[in-house]
Structures are given as structure tokens and as C-alpha cells.
Amino acid sequence: MITSVVVAERTGMVASLIRLTGNWDLAEDCVQDAVERALVHWPDKGIPRAPAAWLTTVAKNRAVDVLRRRQTEQAKLQQRAIMEEMGPSDAWHPGSRSDDRLLLIFTCCHPALALEGQVALTLRTVAGLSTAEIARAFLVSESTMSQRLLRTKRKISNAAIPYQVPPDELLAERTGGVLGVLYLIFNAGYGQREDHLAVESLRLARMLVDLLPRDDEARGLLALVTFQMSRRSTRFDAHGDLVPMEEQDRRRWDPTLIAEGHTHLRQAASSGRPPGAYRLQAQIAACHATSETAKATDWGTVVTLYDALLAAQPSSVIALNRAIAVGFRDGYEDGIAALDGLDAEDLAGYYLLPAARADFLRRLGRDDLAQHSYRTALGLAPAGQPEQRLLYRRLTELRPP
Amino acid sequence: MKYMMFVVADPDAAAEAEPSPDDLTIEQWLADVDGRGKRITGDALRPISDATTVRVSRGQVLVTDGPFTESKEWIAGFDILECDNLDEAIAIAAQHPQANGGKLELRPFWTDED
């Protein structure tokens, strides 16, 4: 209970303090301080009647204390800004909180910041992960990550990146940038068995939809993440090996998350706009999520959706996925023909191309040729990762030559 | 916030650029930015063929022709902008005729607080 109150309030508190003081470190430290005090006091004295107000008062008082000690002109201005907004009721300015979170998100994902900095700062400040956690997720040292965060925050201040919701003419483009960062966070987590980042991306996508309820692509991204996350408990076996979708136990897919995905797709469709890339990907994920068996998958619809996705966002990886869907719709021979028609130069070095060919050849019983393609795929797949182990398993399952 | 905006010419990009009916002429751009009081000063610079590089090594002044870089890009001009924030400077840069076929680089000035 205490943790859930804190998690729900943290981002808004940090966002408001940044708006009032322009000082990111101060905001994070003071909110952290308030959270720690809550964890000490609440178990004994009980959760206060208005926990959010309690937390924000403690955080703001702390900020005022710190600023008073600094005695610079700037600190005095920041102090005044906090005092003015605190007002007599000791509560946050009503109604401003959700807006502050939105300002924070748009600033963290500003295109003038390096993409890796956008990702790191979003995870640190919006999601509230520790620097050490983010460093672990991206396989860099804590000092490297801490430098990255510092550089990113410095650029915001030195280049005067505004703390604001972008003006209307930039809103769509900047929202696209935010969605790109969330999608990147999702993908960084989803491939791993330890998928903290995917869980965070779900939380962040829900927050964004909450803040931008009329943005159909934000809903599309959220739907995509919910459909993918519904399969979470079936994607890896007890040994930590990847289970292909057709072998997953569909009864264990999370029906609540699937329903949530459908709800957002319906609401996105009510915008009347043609679906963008995230909505289309979510619709593809929905085809899989709603099919009772792998065999019953509506591959015709999947191919049509990939066609639309290719038109919206030409990419050789999407073309590859379309070719795979063609193989399941029309037959594996046709799938191989579709793979042959892809831009091999663009996909050179990408393990999924030989892996897809190997998979079709295996299904056709052409084990010799399959073996050759599996070997090629194995050489290109990320070493030691679940994807590579799955390819190896497939190779060993073929008839011995 | 004060920004130095370098106007960068890029012959390769210029060759591929497609003019758009929305492009402003430099006169229109200047009229807009000066009219709003967003430009402190600015000018065009002569090309690299007229540039001179100066270094000092062990007390010796070394003077050479042209700039140091291998790049085909060159700084064709500059403007000093006074903007509320980076987004305003970005909007002004995006309207500059050189944005299509060249590029603009925005550099904040050091301030007293630094």
C-alpha cells in the first residue's frame, strides 16, 4: 500500500519541483527524501489521510530548506516559486499535476538530446529507476550511466531546452519522439527474461495515454505493449530458453492485459484517423492474442496489416516479417519465395532472414538445406542469447544426416 | 538565451535538395526574425577559398590557406539569436533558407552563471 501510493505520486512530485526550481537533482533528492521519511513514519503512525499532500509537503519543505542554505539569488527565486505555489493549504496546486508529468516527459524526450540520454533520463526521472538499475539494464557501468544522465541534464539547462508541452505545430512530431523512446525501452526489456524495462514501458505507456487520451498512436503503443506483455509468463521455459509463440500455452496468456489492449485499440479507432505504425503493430499483435491456437491464426489479416505497416513505415525488417506471414498464409514454399524477393543487401548480417528460411525448410522436411540455414543464422544471432539457443535447439532436433 | 547560429553550406546536400514552395527567401527570413527582435546581428562569410588558418607552434606563427577540416561543409554565415528557449531557436533555424539543402547549428553562449 505504502509503495503503491509512493509510486503513484513520485513522478508528479518530481515534475512539479523541476518546473518550480529548474533544478533536476534538487527535485529528485527532495522527493527521495520524502519517500524515505514516509517509509520510516507510515508503518508506525499509519498512512496519513491525504498521503499525496503529506509527501509533497515534506518534499517541498525539504527543497525550501536546501535552497535557504544556498543563499544565492537564483536559490532565492526558486525558493519563492515553491513557497508561492505551496500556498496556505500545503497542497499541490490543484489540477496542475498531470500537466507537470507531461512537461517532464516531453523534456526528457526532446530531440536535441542524444537518444541514449533521452532513454536514460526518462527511466531515471519519469519511471524513477535508480542509476544502478538503468546501468544494469543497458550493460554499462554505473559511472558511465551517471555521466550520461549528468550530460543530458546539463544540456537541458545549458541549451535552454524548454520545460513545456510543445506548441501545436510540433506536438505530433514530438509525441512521436516520446513514443519512440517508450518503444525502445519496451524492446530493450522484452527480449530478456529479466524484463524490468518492459514492465516499466507498460507503466510509462499507461501514464502517457492517461496524459494524452486523444492520441491514437499513444493508445496504439499501449495496446501493442499490453498484447505482448500478456504472453510474458509463457515466453521462457524453466531453463530460461525462449518458447516460440506457436508452442506457448495460450491458456496462460493474461486475459486482463489482452482485454486492455482491445479497449485501447477500439478507443484509438474512434479517432477516425487511419492507423499509424504503432496501431498497426498492435493490430497484428491482437491477431495473435485472440487466436485460440497457432494454427487458427488469421494470417490473411496479418499479411494485410503488414502491407499497411510497410506503406506507413518502409523497412526491410517489416518486409521480412511480412514474408514470414505470407509463408503461413500461402504455404512454406511461397514463404521461401517471399524471402527470396527481399532486399538481401539491406538484411545482410541479420540472423532472422536465414532463421526464417531454415524454419520454412524444416517444416517442408528439407533437413539438409534447413541445417545449412540454421548454421548461418546461428553465426549471426546474438551470442549466448535466448534467440541463439533456440536456433541451436532446432538444429539439433533435425534428422541426423 | 543567446544562441550563435552557424549557417552551414553542404554541397552534397545542396545537390539533392528539392526546393519547396514554403521556403522563405533570405530577405523574408530576415524581415521576420528582425521584425520580432530575435536577431542581434549576423552576416554572410566568403567561401573557404578565401579563408586563412592561423596557428602558433613553439613561438612560430603558422599561416596556411583554407580551413583545417577535410569536410566539404563550410560555414557560410552566422546569426546571433536572442530567444526564450531552444524550441524558439529551432523554429527560427527551421525557417532559414539554408535549412533545406544545408544546415544550421545552434550553439548557446556561455552565460555568467556558468
Image (spheres, rainbow, N blue to C red):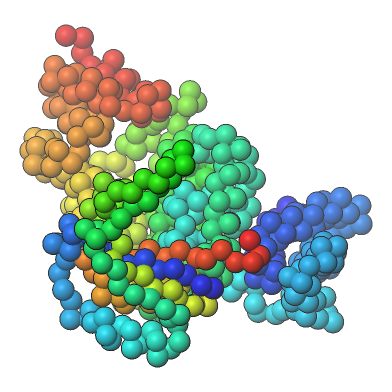
Horizontal and vertical percent for residue A290? 35, 52
Q: A198 or A304, which is in the foreground? A: A198
Quarter residue B44 falls in: bottom left
Residue that sits furthest to the front in the current view? B60
Q: Residue at (88%, 54%) from the top-left corner? A: A41
Residue A238 falls left or right of residue A46: left
Q: Quick check: A264 above or below A384?
A: below
Instruction: Name the residue furthest top.
Output: A401
Please determine whether, in this image, residue A400 is positioned above or below residue A28.
above
Q: Identify the residue at horizontal 49%, vertical 54% (top origin).
A: A118
Residue A263 seen in this snapshot? no
User: Does residue B1 appear to the left or right of A214 in the view shown?
Assistant: right
Q: Nearer the viewer, residue A331 or A62?
A: A62
- At 13% from the left and 62% from the top, the residue drawn is B15
Residue A125 placement: quadrant: bottom right
Please name whichever residue, A9 or B24, is drawn nearer the observer in this view of the structure. Answer: B24
> Which sits in the foreground, A184 or B25?
B25
Q: Which residue occupies 44% across, 68% down? A: B4
Q: Look at the image and tell me in which quarter the C terminus of chain A lies.
A: top left
Q: Is residue A49 left or right of residue A225?
A: right
Q: Quadrant of the N terminus of chain A?
A: bottom right
Most extreme residue toward the right is: A45
Give x and y (percent) for residue A158. Answer: 56, 62
Query: Residue A357's spot in the image, x, y percent?
Result: 17, 31
Residue B31 placed where, x, y %? 33, 88
Does the rendering let one see residue A85? yes
